[in-house]
Amino acid sequence: MTLRAFVILISLVPSFLQAQSEWVEEFKIVGGSDFIATDVLENIYRVDQTELYKYDSQGKFQFRYSDKQLGVITSIDATYPLRPLVLYADLNYVILLDNTLSNNRGNINLVNHGIGLAMTACSSVQNHFWFYDAMQFALIRTNENFTQVSTSGNLSQILGIDLNPNFMVEFANRVYLNNPETGILVFDIFGTYIKTIPITGLDQFQVFEDEIVYFENHKLFQYNTKLFQAREIEINPNAENAYFWKDRIILDCPKEVIVLKKTL
């Protein structure tokens, strides 16, 4: 399944659901997208099939990357803006870009590193990476050279469930693997299963301290993982996805990306 978003990793609890807040359009980025992504430097990444575009915090175009031989881009994790990780799941390749979207390490065939079919991937601390390998039904952590350093083992056997994950992110030494049918599976840094957060049917989510933020039915939901309660805000009905971005909301619409600024 195609990843529909990128996760913003900051430790501040999002405040966009405050009732007294209003939202006004700050700028637009013209062009359709399969999904968008952001990073902690407030850059925006727009993915359209095989094309990747990078914009600054004011929506100004900066760089472009494309490799049509690798096909459609499945996901991008720009948690670390100096080395965005791009996955081409159909061909089981990844690439590492720099901050100018230059590919300095070449195309990396994951089969050569013992990963048979990476359905989803994300960056990890210490220049490491996570992959979910559908051939092994396992969550695999590698070092910067893509050498395996830890694995969850066969999760289908361990958990007794069918796995078809479509999204993954690491936050605060925890790995969050989205399995739409059963919820968000949480693991420690060694790939040991901890728990399942019972939010199902998602394509993506954002992780904060004690918070899961996700988009569903034209609304953004803020789910408190300690209180097991959710709050919501209605979003433009034309949006196909929406993301919290510090004091902004990004709307991924069919023909444009709209950035809203919070006012009190």
Image (spheres, grey):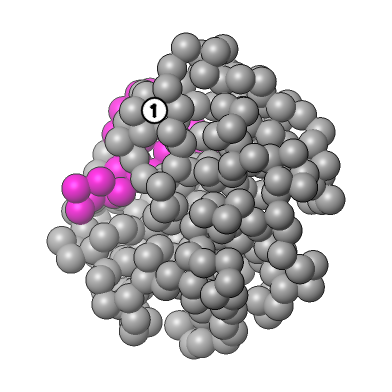
| Quadrant that contains the C terminus | bottom left
Q: Which residue has dot 1 on it?
A: 183
Residue appearing at x 34%, y 81% in the figure: 31
Magenta span: predominant SS is strand
- Work out whether residue 246 can be spotted: no
Q: Position of residue 183 (x, y in %)?
A: 39, 28
Which is more toward the observer, 246 or 7? 7
Which is more toward the observer, 57 or 86? 86
Which is more toward the observer, 18 or 169? 169
Q: Answer whether residue 30 is magenta in the image.
A: no
Q: Position of residue 37 (x, y in %)?
A: 49, 63
Identify the magenta region. 209-230
Q: How many marks?
A: 1
Residue appearing at x 81%, y 33% in the figure: 149
Q: Answer whether residue 221 is magenta in the image.
A: yes
Residue appearing at x 18%, y 65% in the figure: 238
